[in-house]
Amino acid sequence: MTAHIFFMLLIMAFAVILLRLFPFLLFSGGRKIPSWMEYLGETVTAAAIAMLVVYSFYGNLEFSSDGWARFLPGTAAGALTVLLQYFIRNPLLSIVAGTFLYMFLIR
């Protein structure tokens, strides 16, 4: 590993640590988190997941002869993931089972 790559990794690691530590430093000592920031904390996660779902399914929608062949495995795997999460409430199991079903169906 060259010195250039080492220092790049060192700077990136330092930046990530600072960015992760910043909120704890900013709101330490009993400072109250602003209401707009609490609102973002509650809504951004669900919005990001919704965008990922839409993006994932949109990538499988192609108006070609094999469009359904790509759309159906993703839909089945997504439905399995949602159902398992709804009934069992184990995110790891839901994600692994949905991924396994998708990989099984496309092969």
Image (cartoon, rainbow, N blue to C red):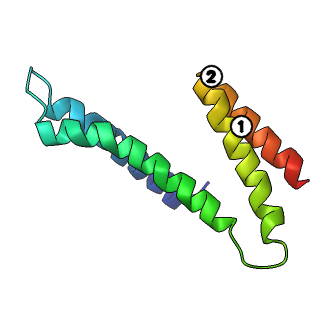
> What residue is pinned by disc 1?
80
Q: Is residue 68 left or right of residue 78?
A: right
- Helix, strand or loop at label 2? It is helix
Q: Is residue 11 visible?
A: yes
Q: Is residue 14 visible?
A: no
Q: Earlier in the sequence, mark 2 or mark 1?
A: 1
What residue do we see at 8% from left, 26% from top? 31
Residue 100 in the image: state x and y as whole percent.
Answer: 80, 39
> What residue is pinned by disc 2?
87
Q: Residues within 10 Å of mark 2 (few under 14, many from 20)?
A: few
Q: CA distance from mark 2 to mark 1?
A: 11 Å
**Where on the picture, by quarter, is residue 28?**
top left
- In-front residue for pair 38/82: 82
Residue 54 in the image: state x and y as whole percent.
Answer: 54, 58
| Kind of residue at disc 1 | Leu
What residue do we see at 15% from left, 42% from top? 36
